[in-house]
Amino acid sequence: MSAEIPRLDLAARASNLVPGSDGIWFAAGDDDQGFASADPTDWVDIENRSFWYGHRNDVVLDALKRFPPKGWLFEIGAGNGAVAAAAQAAGWPVVAVEPTVAWARNARRRGLSHVICAHFQNAGFASGALENAALFDVLEHIDDDAGFLAEVRGLMPADGRLYLAVPSFRFLWSKEDELSGHCRRYRASQLEERVCAAGFRIEHRTYFFAPLMPVILVARALPYRLGLARDRTHASSAAAHGVSNSLPVRLARAVLKGELALLRRGVRLPLGASLLVVARAA
């Protein structure tokens, strides 16, 4: 896609939004979530250089191409805007919705045209305002994930598309999940059950990051079970997400390139460290 991104009147979509001087829309009375404020990791730097974030973007963009949203895509919990910026650059009209002020500002600095800094429940979205919705590595942070999905569905029109990416398989649980504030990792059947119960029908699902499963098991999950896991630092996060040009990182990029080729051919992978689902509002 190469069409110019149109302008969207966000005030017409959400009654509680007010524009800020920095081009970000805020919800009146909403509190800064301040997520991960004590985390020493510079995630913007890592997102810009990491093979992990690059591959996730490629997988998401492939899903958008094969199952395109009709109208605007609202990414809820957009973080620093890594996925939203990639989608916008590919020509999709995107609105990044992020309740942490610092992260919303990072998303705006990435060049995103439409950024809302608010908990999406407080924005005052009208019924049907979320033409399409996306949650990329967000749902696992939410205690009541089923209720959250139902709230999202309540703001979408029939046939709007939902795009989800989550970490998968409980046996890969590690201290990294705890530090990231995860409540769970998912199996496909578990996620599909919640999505369908919220009023969606599944169109597509696949695992991805299959080559990383043994690495995560050995480097993260087993040390965690043995009580050997260490606290997170920027250096450890950078190393774990592969920002260098070392031989292991080059090998990982090459193997994941092969995985992406399979996904682009429509192959649904039976295993992987992450899970992608596309569903349509019933």
Image (cartoon, helix red, strand yellow):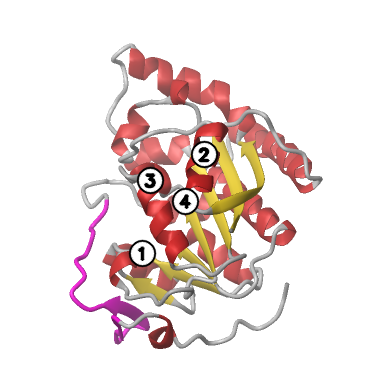
The Cα–Cα distance between marks 1 and 4, rounded to whole angstroms, is 22 Å
Q: Determine the residue positioned at 70% across, 59% down.
A: 67
Q: Which residue type does callout 1 highlight?
A: Glu
Earlier-in-chain disc, 1 versus 4: 1
Dot 2, crowdedness within 10 Å: few (<14), some or many (≥20)?
A: some
Earlier-in-chain disc, 2 versus 1: 1
Dot 4, crowdedness within 10 Å: few (<14), some or many (≥20)?
A: many
Q: Which residue is mark 1?
A: 98
Q: Quadrant of residue 175?
A: top left
Q: Which residue is mark 2?
A: 193
Q: Secondary structure at mark 1?
A: loop
Earlier-in-chain disc, 1 versus 3: 1
| Depicted 195 relative to depicted 115: above or below | above
Pick the quarter of the image with the C terminus: bottom right
Earlier-in-chain disc, 3 versus 2: 3
Disc 1 to disc 3: CB gap under 8 Å? no
In-image side of 15 versus 129 (left or right): left
The Cα–Cα distance between marks 1 and 3, rounded to whole angstroms, is 17 Å
Q: Determine the residue positioned at 73% across, 72% down.
A: 1
Q: Which residue type does callout 4 highlight?
A: Ala
Picture disc at residue 5: none
Q: Which residue type does callout 2 highlight?
A: Glu
Q: Which residue type does callout 3 highlight?
A: Asp
Q: Which residue is mark 3?
A: 145
| Depicted 188 relative to depicted 25: above or below | above
Q: Which residues are magenta?
A: 16-35
Residue 198 appears anywhere in the view = yes
The Cα–Cα distance between marks 4 and 2, rounded to whole angstroms, is 9 Å
Q: Which residue is mark 4?
A: 198
Earlier-in-chain disc, 4 versus 3: 3
Instruction: Choose mark 4 or mark 3, whichever is in front.
Output: 4
In-image side of 249 versus 115 (left or right): right
